[in-house]
Image (cartoon, rainbow, N blue to C red):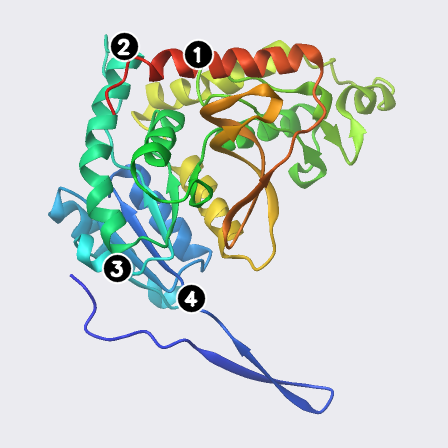
């Protein structure tokens, strides 16, 4: 249910060198489609990080959307002000960011292709309703298979491609950094590492780009002079990253906190006035010789969406892995009815 009052952009004045400076905090409206474990975790993280001034939660299960929004709303007295509420597509009008989390989880015995078609069909019903009321929003695709749904959105929504961003391997990248930081016992801010390609089995780590405080990761290990740390196995780390989601689902039946923090970070980047380099899924247009597929490479993102993609220097083997990942996705795409 929409709020009965209207948010006014707050204006704060502070004194600097004897002069009053006026700072305007721009309103930021975010709509989340899908109020399940993932959507509600994103909403909660957005509130904790003060990313939005208004959050609209939309779900086919209206009671679920109402309950999640109300539960979070009743914690907002201890957060920065945010108007979070449930609503319908009309309430998403003029959203700055729209986050798509709706879809079904993969069932036992269900093929990846079957899951893809099911969630493509769900997204197909959502696209005309949301793009009608929020044609100028930046769209963040979270639902899986994220690269396929990002591709669908680019091809069928009429929204500019640079306004459509898939979370892609951003969560995989967080898992990778956590694992490497744990192995070396270092703070994660010192670490630069990314997962490229599909958010799925064909993803890979371009180890040539991994560094600790600008020192290549293997050289960093050598510089430790054998301080009781066994040399990390790259393949073992990658295998752990790929299996992490399954491990979590097996233990608690879903993954939600990691993707909640991941999506919130992407929204924070979009909200910022300056561009940032991140890993994200978007439509490639010739980078690394790959076109007409959405997958994750280094991407420049800011308030205007995607402003560029970086062709980082990869080894020949890493480029081959990226092309293999693209081919895996294209093999699925050719069997999908969009």
Q: From the viewer's perspective, is residue 332 above or below residue 100?
A: above
Instruction: Please report the residue visible at 27 percent of the width from the left and 10 percent of the height from the top.
Output: 111
Find residue 328 and name its label: 1
**Which callout, 3 or 2, points to the residue nearer the camera?**
3
**Residue at 81% across, 25% down:** 220
Camera-nearest label, 4 or 1: 1
**Residue holding disc 4:** 80
Q: Which residue is mark 2?
A: 111
Element type at marker 4?
loop
User: Which residue is under mark 3?
Assistant: 93
* For marks 3 and 2 on the same chain, the one whose residue lies earlier in the sequence: 3
Identify the secondary structure beneath mark 1.
helix
- Give the mark nearest the N terminus, 4 or 2: 4
Q: Mark 1 packing: few (<14 Cα in 10 Å), some, or many (20+)?
A: some
Mark 2 nearby-residue class (10 Å; few <14, some 14–19, many ≥20): few
- The x, y position of residue 19, in whole percent, is 68, 90
Mark found first going from the N terminus, 4 or 3 = 4
On screen, residue 126 versus residue 169, left or right, reads: left
* Badge 4: residue crowd in 10 Å (few <14, some 14–19, many ≥20): some
Quadrant location, the C terminus: top left
The front one of 305 and 30 is 305
Percent position (x, y) of residue 235? 61, 10
Where in the figure is residue 152, as x and y percent of width and height? 32, 30
Distance from the alpha carbon under mark 1 to that under mark 2: 14 Å
Q: Is residue 87 above or below residue 177?
A: below
Identify which residue is drawn at 52% across, 20% down: 241
């Amino acid at each position: 249910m929409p709020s009965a009052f209207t948010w006014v952009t707050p204006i704060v004045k502070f004194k600097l060198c004897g002069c009053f400076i006026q700072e305007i905090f721009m309103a930021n409206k975010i709509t989340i489609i899908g109020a399940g474990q993932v959507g509600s975790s994103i909403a909660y993280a957005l509130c904790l990080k003060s990313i939005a001034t208004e959050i609209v939660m939309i779900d086919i299960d209206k009671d679920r959307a109402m309950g999640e929004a109300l539960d979070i709303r009743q914690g907002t007295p201890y957060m920065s002000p945010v108007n979070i509420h449930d609503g319908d597509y009309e309430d998403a009008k003029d959203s700055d960011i729209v986050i798509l989390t709706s879809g079904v989880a993969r069932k036992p015995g269900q093929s990846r292709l079957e899951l893809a078609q099911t969630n493509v069909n769900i997204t197909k019903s959502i696209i005309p309703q949301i793009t009608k009321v929020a044609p100028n929003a930046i769209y963040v695709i979270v639902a899986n298979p994220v690269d396929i749904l990002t591709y669908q959105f680019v091809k069928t929504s009429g929204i500019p491609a640079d306004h459509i961003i898939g979370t892609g391997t951003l969560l995989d990248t967080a898992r990778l950094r956590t694992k490497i930081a744990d192995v070396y016992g270092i703070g994660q801010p010192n670490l630069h590492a990314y997962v490229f390609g599909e958010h799925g089995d064909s993803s890979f780590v371009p180890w040539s780009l991994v560094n600790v405080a600008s020192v290549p990761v293997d050289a960093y290990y050598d510089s430790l002079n054998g301080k009781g740390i066994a040399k990390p196995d790259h393949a073992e780390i990658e295998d752990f990253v790929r299996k992490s989601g399954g491990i979590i689902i097996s233990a608690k039946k879903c993954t939600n906190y990691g993707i909640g923090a991941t999506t919130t970070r992407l929204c924070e980047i979009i909200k910022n006035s300056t561009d940032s380099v991140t890993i994200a899924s978007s439509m490639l247009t010739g980078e690394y010789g790959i076109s007409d597929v959405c997958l994750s490479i280094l991407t420049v993102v800011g308030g205007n969406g995607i402003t560029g993609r970086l062709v980082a220097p990869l080894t020949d083997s890493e480029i081959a892995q990226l092309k293999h990942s693209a081919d895996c996705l294209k093999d699925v795409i050719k069997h999908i009815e969009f």
